């Protein structure tokens, strides 16, 4: 008989550990570089609150083998094996398989679609099936002739003794999921926190951190939460260290994969990433991963700990990093640890970019960035602040004087709505509003580029539904607005902003108008904004991307009074005239082009210049920008090594 893997649905907890283990087994135990490369050969299926895993059955007399015209599929080692080099992508096997166990995949965008199926980890050095070895409830097992005979004998014995034929239904699942409910970090009362700009989440106490760490199932050492974290933080391992009281060790582990863990613990949308992937999400609530990540570094730093970078051997290369945001800092961190001299140039007076000036202090205390600046400076990174490339220093000068340059400039371009009256006094953009507010809280002087808008006692309306819109709404509350309203053209479930931030805004007194689309901006006799004209919408049929789009409802027009209207439609690439003439290609949106044949994924069309973060892929998360910066640093180091060996 052929060997195959069976799943005990009663004990499956839907943790995806089998999928992760499968992918890692076929990637030399490393995380895939691209999300598109995550192609497991076993799949967890969810239906009606239950889950189970399905994969190739390695059928005897398999129909896929019979219909393959090139013998890419064959019987070998008591299983159905696949030779990719012989596959012509005809899909005959996909049609023939009665279990849907074969799928067509491509290694990259330019590669043809070829078949893929479970090979029982035939080429894995361990000799074990990764999914079976990593299933935390032993819901998966390999069935071969020996296992089948053992199962038969066990059933014979139970029958002869008059015992129950099978063990209690799902007992391992129930035992593993028997965890207390999530508590997480406690918030300052809404009425109190509206009066100041301090962080609203209280730090975890030691007992609270212990409680949350005890809840972790430790589904696997490399688990689903690791994969959904763009940095692939070792989440189960650092939670285990917290549970063991090893805070310094946990902090060191966090810093192996992240340059700013205490910041990501505060501002990452964990509900869409690691916590959204937690197996306990629907079983008492996800483990408070973000709170624990913050607790680890905050506690370690308070104990006097600093990141250990070991013995650093200085290298001859020098790198200029433009932009001290998460992409630039991530790049500088990796390079400095490798002994490269790094100079970071930024136009703001403090490091952090939009971490410092775009994210309000009630979400991220700015003293945290000051401490991080000290840490980076102690590592040998040199910061040149209030230095704008193209104004205070020429880009050509950096390219000529450094061995490589990294562009982590972010996206500061403002997105207009194209509404009548958009240039009226009282209509402002989200980013200048947030930067001006934060500068004032930090005690920095007001500058013409970011004037502070007085909104005390005024009616404020914010257009948009993302995290930036939530930041504007909550900032307006703290600045004493008479009323604050969010107007969003889709329903609440479709809002791109963090559900946590929407809830915080609602608690603080923000009113929400959903399914409304702006049509015009009304002015008063003084020529100032007085109202926003809206029309109600209903969700239409899904488009090609599967997303339903709002459709106006005839006759539902109305006006919403407003003294200040904040446009929070997101950001786009800003003009960078200083890049011209340096052989750096931009796409049609003004974003920097990277990658391509024989180039690093972050390398631009100028061999010495690398780029990453929002300036390359558009406005995104802090964590994805940091990933790009760290990747660029690794690609620079590879380039330097290649040049040494040439």
Image (tube, rainbow, N blue to C red):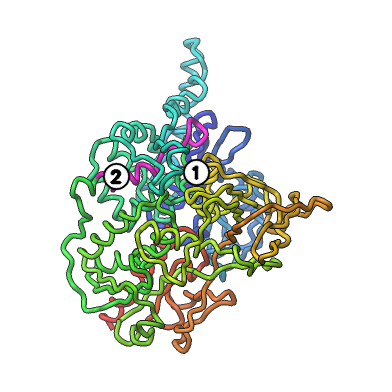
Cα–Cα gap, marks 1 and 2: 21 Å
Q: Residue visible at 21% across and 75% down? A: 315
Q: Quadrant of residue 372?
A: bottom left
What's the mark number on residue 446? none
Q: Is residue 285 magenta?
A: yes
Q: Residue visible at 29% across and 39% down? A: 242
Residue at the far front: name it. Answer: 525
Q: Which residue is mark 1?
A: 276
Earlier in the chain: of badge 1 and badge 2, it is 1
**Percent position (x, y) of residue 282?**
52, 34
Q: In front here: 297 or 160?
A: 297
Q: Which residue is mark 2?
A: 296
**Percent position (x, y) of residue 616?**
49, 70
**Residue 75 visible in rendering:** no
Q: In front here: 21 or 496?
A: 496
Q: Residue visible at 33% across and 65% down? A: 350
Magenta range:
281-299
Q: Residue visible at 50% across and 49% down? A: 480
Q: Is residue 11 magenta?
A: no
């Amino acid at each position: 008989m052929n060997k195959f893997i069976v799943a005990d649905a009663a004990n499956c907890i839907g943790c995806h550990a089998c999928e992760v283990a499968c992918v890692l087994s076929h990637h030399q135990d490393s995380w895939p570089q691209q999300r598109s490369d995550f192609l497991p050969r076993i799949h967890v299926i969810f239906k009606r609150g239950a889950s189970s895993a399905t994969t190739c059955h390695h059928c005897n007399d398999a129909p896929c083998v019979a219909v393959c015209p090139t013998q890419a599929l064959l019987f070998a080692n008591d299983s159905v094996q696949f030779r990719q080099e012989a596959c012509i992508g005809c899909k005959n096997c996909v049609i023939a398989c009665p279990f849907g166990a074969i799928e067509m995949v491509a290694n990259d965008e330019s590669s043809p679609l070829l078949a893929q199926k479970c090979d029982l980890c035939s080429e894995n050095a361990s000799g074990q099936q990764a999914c079976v070895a990593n299933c935390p409830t032993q819901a998966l097992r390999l069935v071969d002739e020996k296992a089948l005979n053992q199962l038969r004998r066990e059933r014979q014995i139970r029958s002869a003794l008059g015992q129950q034929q099978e063990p209690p239904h799902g007992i391992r699942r129930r035992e593993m999921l028997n965890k207390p409910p999530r508590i997480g970090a406690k918030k300052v009362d809404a009425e109190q926190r509206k009066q100041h700009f301090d962080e609203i989440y209280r730090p975890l106490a030691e007992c609270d951190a212990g409680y949350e760490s005890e809840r972790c199932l430790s589904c696997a050492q490399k688990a689903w939460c690791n994969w959904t974290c763009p940095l692939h933080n070792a989440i189960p391992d650092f939670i285990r260290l917290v549970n063991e009281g090893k805070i310094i060790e946990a902090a060191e582990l966090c810093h192996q994969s992240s340059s700013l863990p205490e910041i990501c613990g505060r501002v990452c949308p964990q509900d869409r990433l690691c916590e959204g992937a937690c197996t306990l999400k629907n079983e008492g609530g996800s483990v408070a991963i973000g709170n624990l990540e913050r607790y680890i570094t905050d506690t370690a730093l308070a104990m006097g700990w600093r990141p250990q970078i070991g013995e650093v051997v200085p290298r001859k290369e020098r790198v200029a990093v433009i932009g001290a945001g998460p992409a630039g800092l991530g790049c500088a961190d990796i390079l400095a640890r490798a002994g490269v001299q790094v100079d970071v140039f930024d136009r703001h007076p403090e490091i952090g970019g939009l971490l410092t000036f775009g994210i309000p202090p009630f979400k991220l205390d700015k003293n945290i960035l000051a401490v991080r600046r000290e840490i980076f400076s102690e590592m040998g990174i040199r910061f040149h602040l209030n230095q704008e490339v193209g104004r205070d220093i020429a880009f050509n000068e950096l390219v000529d004087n450094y061995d490589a340059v990294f562009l982590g400039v972010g996206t500061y371009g403002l997105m207009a709505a194209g509404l009548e009256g958009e240039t009226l006094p009282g209509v402002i953009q989200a980013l200048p509003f947030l930067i001006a507010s934060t500068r004032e809280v930090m005690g920095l002087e007001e500058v013409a580029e970011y004037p502070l808008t007085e909104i005390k006692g005024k009616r404020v309306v914010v257009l948009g539904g993302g995290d930036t819109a939530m930041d504007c709404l909550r900032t307006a509350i703290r600045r004493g607005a008479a009323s604050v309203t969010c107007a969003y053209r889709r329903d609440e479930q479709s809002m791109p902003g963090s559900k946590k931030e929407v809830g915080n805004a609602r608690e603080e007194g923000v009113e929400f108008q959903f399914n409304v689309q702006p049509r015009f901006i009304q002015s008063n006799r003084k020529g100032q904004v007085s109202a926003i004209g809206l029309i109600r919408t209903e969700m239409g049929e899904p488009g090609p991307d599967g997303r339903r789009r709002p459709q106006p409802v005839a006759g539902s027009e109305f006006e919403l009074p407003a003294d200040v209207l904040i446009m929070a439609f997101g950001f786009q690439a800003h003009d960078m005239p200083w890049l011209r003439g340096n052989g750096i290609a931009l796409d049609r949106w003004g974003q920097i082009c990277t990658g391509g044949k024989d180039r690093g994924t972050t390398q631009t069309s100028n061999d010495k210049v690398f780029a990453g973060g929002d300036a390359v892929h558009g406005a995104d998360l802090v964590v994805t920008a940091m990933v790009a910066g760290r990747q660029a640093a690794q690609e620079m180091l590879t380039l330097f090594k290649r040049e040494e060996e040439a």
